[in-house]
Amino acid sequence: MEEKNRRLCWKNIEAIDPVAALGEYSFMPPTHVIFDTNCLLCSGLVKFILRHERRDDIIFVNAWSDTGLEMAKSHGLTHEDLNQTFLVIRSERGFIKSDAALEIFRSLKMPWRAMRILRFVPRPLRDLVYTVIAKHRYEWFGYEPSCTVVPPEQSYRFIKVDSDK
């Protein structure tokens, strides 16, 4: 009987997610996604993230705002660089191109989180695919100034992103 109780107790301890247990008192800094708010593909990806994220701890920033440009500059990126990539900042570390996408997958629920397996594909190959899509994103997916529609209940998570649509 004692062995059974010990097993049950151990199972309960394993089931506790320490970050979820802390809730709003979590000491994990938020992840920032600096993205092109004029790109329909990018705005669609933000909607996808909102639907599939594990926790609502991602902050979205307009790449073309003063805030977005300053954050990019602090990670060595220029305005022109932001035309070719989005930036993910997690724990003060910046990620670009395919590495940024892999960081986003880390924040998603399964099965999307499993896409992190792509990290085993060599970075030059991942970045080549990323660069081709980024170069043609407006012609393939569309361009519309301030196309990102911010859900009102999520507006506190968006910095300098127009929500008048």
Image (tube, rainbow, N blue to C red):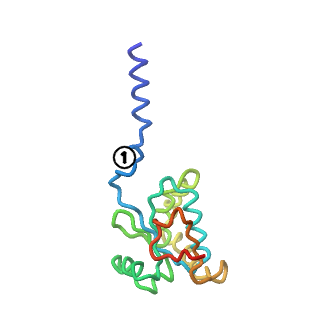
Name the quadrant of the N terminus: top left
- Outermost residue toward the bottom? 80
Q: Secondary structure at mark 1?
A: helix
Q: Nearer the viewer, residue 127 or 108?
A: 108
Is 101 above or below relative to 66?
A: above
Is 160 above or below relative to 28?
A: below
Q: Nearer the viewer, residue 26 or 4?
A: 26
Is 9 above or below relative to 146?
A: above
Task: Identify which residue is drawn at 47% across, 69% down.
Answer: 158
Residue 67 rendering spot, x and y as whole percentages:
39, 78
Residue 116 rendering spot, x and y as whole percentages:
51, 57
Dividing the picture into quarters, in which one does residue 59 lie? bottom left
Name the quadrant of the C terminus: bottom right
Residue 45 rendering spot, x and y as whole percentages:
58, 68
Residue 69 rendering spot, x and y as whole percentages:
40, 81
- Outermost residue toward the right? 140
Is residue 147 found left or right of 85 in the rendered image? right
Q: Nearer the viewer, residue 143 or 113?
A: 143
Residue that numbered label 1 is attached to? 22
- Outermost residue toward the top? 1
How many callouts does the rendering have? 1
Task: Identify which residue is drawn at 38% across, 70% down.
Answer: 94
Dividing the picture into quarters, in which one does residue 90 lie? bottom left
Q: Residues within 10 Å of mark 1 (few under 14, many from 20)?
A: few
Q: Amino acid at mark 1?
A: Leu
Task: Identify which residue is drawn at 56% across, 50% down.
Answer: 110
